[in-house]
Amino acid sequence: MFMAISYDSIITTDDALKKKLDVHGLQVVDLTCAITPTYAFLTRLGENLKKKFGAKTILRVAVDSSVVGGAIVSYKGRYVDLSLKKKLEKYFLDKKEEILKKLES
């Protein structure tokens, strides 16, 4: 079962809420995107998460324009940064010397 939750539905993850989620077998997956994802995207993602984790899933969505593109996903302490921001930072860090040389010429 996939539950589409509005962006502000879950504001806190205090212990009482965690216990309620555990009792009902619900897993929380945090998703941070640069733009507001469409309902169709969230539905597909929820179905994939259910297949992957085999559990009822609550998808907590945050919108953060600094992500630039892609997404950041965290689940049960695991964190995957698939953002364009991270890729651009890595690219410019790797090419820093080359870029500075070109700017100096």
Image: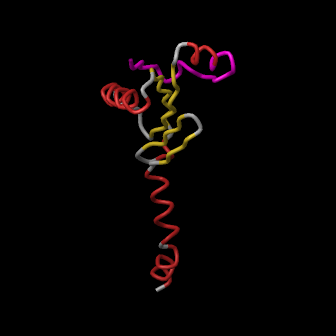
Q: Is residue 30 left or right of residue 69?
A: right
Q: Residue at x 64, y 17 (%)?
A: 19
Q: Quadrant of residue 48?
A: top left
Q: Is residue 33 left or right of residue 13?
A: left
Q: Residue at x 34, y 27 (%)?
A: 47
In magenta stretch: residue 15:
yes
* Residue 75 location (% of width, % of height): 53, 35
Q: Establish if 20 lies above or below 86.
A: above
Which quadrant is home to the N terminus? top left
Q: Residue at x 68, y 15 (%)?
A: 16
Q: Residue at x 47, y 76 (%)?
A: 99
Query: Which stretch appears magenta?
Result: 1-18
* Residue 80 location (% of width, % of height): 50, 45
In the displayed image of the protein, which residue is found farthest to the bottom? 105
Q: Nearer the viewer, residue 51 or 39?
A: 51
In the displayed image of the protein, which residue is found farthest to the right? 15
Q: Nearer the viewer, residue 34 or 52?
A: 52
Secondary structure that dominates the magenta span:
loop
* Residue 71 location (% of width, % of height): 44, 42
Which color scheme is applied?
Answer: secondary structure
* Residue 44 location (% of width, % of height): 32, 29
Q: Nearer the viewer, residue 72 or 97?
A: 72
Q: Is residue 38 left or right of residue 85?
A: left
Q: Quadrant of residue 18?
A: top right
Q: How many marks?
A: 0
